[in-house]
Amino acid sequence: MRRIALAGLATLVLGLGMVESAQAWGKRKHGCEAPCASECAPAPAPCAVPVNYEYRTVMTYRTEYQTQWTEVERIVQRLVPKREQREVEETVWEQVQKEMKAERTVLVPQTVRENRTREVIHVEWTTQNQERRYMVPETVIENRPYEVMVCKWVEQKQNVTVQVPKTTVEERTVPVTTWQTVSEVVSHPVTSYQTVSEVVSRPVTSYQTVSEVVSRPVTTCQTVSVPVCDPCTGCVKWVCQSVPVTTTQQHTVCRQVPVTTTQQYTVCRQVPVTTMQQHTVSRQVPVQSSQKVQVPVTTMVSENRTVTVQVPTQVKEQRTAQVQVCRMVEKKEMVQVQVPVEKRVQENYTVEVCKWAEQKQPYSYYVCEMVSKKVKRPVEYVTWQTVSEKVKERVANQVAVQVPVAVRVCVPVPAPAPMPCPPAPCY
């Protein structure tokens, strides 16, 4: 856009220059008042006028549209539920059990004694003489020799080399460190905080009440006749039984629906700004120097000495010990032993046997009957009322604002006055 504007300005300046040159040429042709005007020849081409260009900053204005929020009050109609408790009378079928009596034939177990014969093995014990052999331990004391190693200490002289300490004084140079205070300029960053405001938009969710019709299943009991077979007589009877029946009912339900809108607000936040500050710091600097010190030095010197040492030696020695020796000796003995003898004998015994006998017994059973009954129960009724309410809303308006803008433009500038053109000759 800027290049198009510059090209248009340059074209306009060149057109103005050409018009002025054409007017000047016409004056030279028709306005010549010299005595030889009738004999004037056509004028030559005008001299070219030099033009220079330079960049200049021009302030212009552009239109920007900004959003402004205003609060507007409006009246909203809302439905508010109103709940009431009412008593409703309804007929309910109640199940009642009735006792019935009957007679049945039952098999009863009876115990009967029976005499039976079986073969039994009897064991009788008889005495017999038998020979028994066994080992008896016998202890004897014996003298047995054995050798023992006995330790004896013998004195012996030995030559030993011993290290003896010897101390001498030496002069040594030792480095010494001293501390000197030096001041220097140090720069360090300092952070400060500056408050900056910016526009932030965020979504805001509000809830709106919406009513809808919902169908749900409702289960009730219904009395149905069911055939039942008696296991004793085999007769089929009809019995009343409650069966659940499901129906669909419609109800009006209110639910909250979220509605999301966008709001803009101004937020101030702290922006860190870092600057460098200088200050003078004193610190300790180590300075190295040397110093001569006399130090005692200990060295070890070898020295030969004669020492008397106790040396252990081992000597064999014969000794005798009495030892108890145990030996096993065999002995024989006659013993009377009880020996078992088996005999088969016939034996009579009585056994209890179970037999089944028929017997009639009375019994009772229960039959279910349905009885109607009137019951009152509370029911909740919901009615809807229209309520008007004042609500404040924010409305966005677009406002046109003129914003100054600096534009850099290339402008033609007239050059210094050129040399005058030579006069046209008159003929």
Image: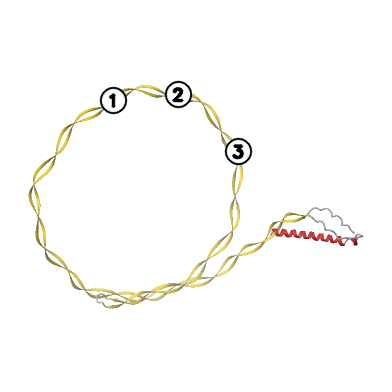
Q: Which residue is mark 1?
A: 153
Residue drawn at point x = 55 percent, y = 62 percent: 203
Quadrant in which residue 33 is drawn: bottom right
Q: Are marks 3 and 2 in contact (CB under 8 Å)?
A: no
The answer to whether residue 372 of the structure is visible from this angle is no
Which dot, 3 or 1, sits closer to the camera?
1
Residue bearing mark 3 = 184
> For residue 63, which quarter of the picture?
bottom right
The C terminus sits in image quarter: bottom right
Q: Which circle's residue, 3 or 2, is located before the other in the chain?
A: 2
Name which residue lies at 12% across and 43% down: 134
Gap between marks 3 and 2 measured at Cα: 50 Å
Q: Residues within 10 Å of mark 3 (few under 14, many from 20)?
A: few
- In this rendering, the answer to whether 96 lies above or below 7 is below
Left or right: where 90 falls relative to 200: left
The residue identified by callout 2 is 167
The amino acid at mark 1 is: Trp
Coordinates of residue 12 in the picture (x, y in percent): 76, 60
Measure the C-alpha gap from mark 1 to mark 2: 40 Å
